[in-house]
Image: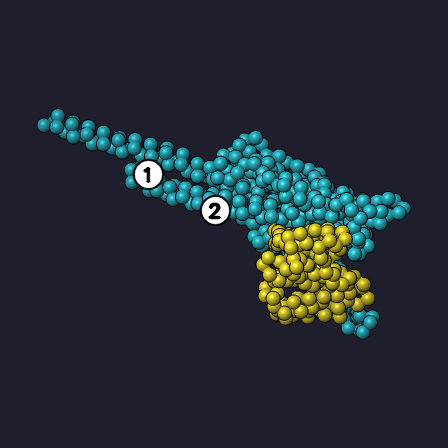
Chain colours: A cyan, B yellow
Amino acid sequence: MANVLDLRRRIRSVKSTRQITKAMKMVSAAKLRRAQDRALAARPYAQRITSVLASLERRIEVLDPKTGNLRHPLFATRPEKRVLLLVVSGEKGFAGAFNTNILKAAFHFLAANEDKEIDIEAIGRKAREQMRRRYPAAVFVESTEENPADGSPLIRRVRSRKARVEVTGDHPGLLEKLTHDQIQSLTQDMIARYVHEEIDACYLVYNEFKSVIQQRIVVERLLPLIEPGKHQVTEAIEPSAEERERAAEAAVSSGVSLTPEDYAEADAEATKFGTAEVDYIYEQPARELYNGLLPRYVASMLFHALAESVAAEHAARMTAMDAATNNASDMIDSLTLYMNRVRQAAITKEIIEIVSGAAAL
Amino acid sequence: MATETNQLRVRFVTPDHVLVDEMATAVELPSKTGYIEVLYGHAPLLAELGAGDVTLHGAAGGHARYNVSWGFVEVLPERVTILANDALLPEAIDVPRAQEQLARGQALWNAAGDSEEAYCEANRVIDEAHAKLASAAHPN
């Protein structure tokens, strides 16, 4: 039987663990609120781009006269032979099954597309570690040619594919501080690969997050675009009712609201952008305007997805830390009970000894 | 004279937030094909913005100037909404970085070879850097 001193020490240790998990929960709750605010602040821009695109689409100039389809190369659909997969995970652990679930969805996607060549871009440290461990990095061979114009050396990078699935890049630190510039360059890279037919489609695996109780892991197709303003979700994993309930409990106890933010008013304002019932003067041809906007639209979609994923990560951590705090409390209770019992047993034993000693006199 | 009735409502929306939402008498915009100035009652217009300065005249906070590298604007008779990917006050421009960008743009231009796309990209980088430097040279 453990002695009272040992038990007291263990209780103290569990108590300090509880303090840490509680602090982590509160920090995550604060970060979650901030991430939600940021996602909210990004909405007016994204909404306006979407609505002006929709309005420009009504103009005849952006359509191909032969097929009646939109003319931009991002709308060109090809049979999917080479696919780019962006995996958006968390930066850190201690977030319950958050990272595991995303990676599971990514591996499921890879298994379901065995006949295709897949390039992986890992966003978030956890995805990077896992993907790097499992799949080889893409190899680029540099060749130097002479510039036909002035004879200066020109360096060309040529991809030499060794395996079916390769990691073409990762983006450490991108999620820690989401900046539009970085996402812009990521998008440009993605679009360039698509336009040069290095890839035939681009998918994104991430945790969609409307609110603590409205979230799911989705596989979404970013490219080719079919209809701007619509998310092309090809696969979704909803959390179980139990998980949702636990998340809701954690949110309530840390003061995070359960309902998604109300954007209705701001959105109504944003949808008016570029859609007034008037004859606009187009400073540049409508088609040029449209083509200039499309990459921004893709970037704003990506930004939106990453912002939601960051919020989801904090929410997952908050839930996990809430559960850990509750478990620690339960453990303290049962250890305290046990300690009292042990102490009582020792006292009883001593009394018996005294009483039986007295009786022997 | 500026009155309540002939002022424009100017909104400046960046990817992160709504930067400006105020009344002004005139707005100067760096459209891709050259600067335009918008007054109250302007005909409806849609335009893509290139690198340059957006200037608000007669705003409540006084004269304000922002450097943008890309944007999109909708002009309605009483309202101007600007979407821009970044908007910097001239004081906030990092001059050494802009110079670096200029050097990078020139390097790209030299390395572009006969690729039209690379030239366009290099020109864009150079234009952005020039616009930033010009903007930083004249603080508000």
Please report the residue visible at 78 percent of the width from the left and 46 percent of the height from the top: A278
Instruction: Report x, y in % for residue A66.
Output: 90, 46
Work out which quarter of the rendered image holds the C terminus of chain A and state it: top left
Instruction: Report x, y in % for residue A115.
Output: 76, 43
Identify which residue, A232 or A159, lies in the foreground: A232
Return the chain for callout 2: A
**Residue that mark 2 sits on:** A27
Instruction: Report x, y in % for residue A275.
Output: 74, 45
What amino acid is found at the position of numbered circle 2 in the picture? Val
Whether residue A193 is visible:
no
Please report the residue visible at 58 percent of the width from the left and 59 percent of the height from the top: B61
Dot 2 crowding, Cα within 10 Å, few <14, some 14–19, many 20+: some
Instruction: Report x, y in % for residue B140.
Output: 60, 66
Please report the residue visible at 58 percent of the width from the left and 32 percent of the height from the top: A240
Q: Quadrant of residue A11?
A: top left
Q: Is residue A121 left or right of residue A325?
A: right
What amino acid is found at the position of numbered circle 1 in the picture? Leu
Please report the residue visible at 57 percent of the width from the left and 54 percent of the height from the top: A177
Q: Is residue A257 left or right of residue B25?
A: left
Work out which quarter of the rendered image holds the N terminus of chain A and state it: top left
**Residue that mark 1 sits on:** A7
Whether residue A148 is visible:
yes
Identify which residue, A88 or A76, lies in the foreground: A76
Spatial CA span between label 2 and label 1: 30 Å
Q: Quadrant of residue B29?
A: bottom right
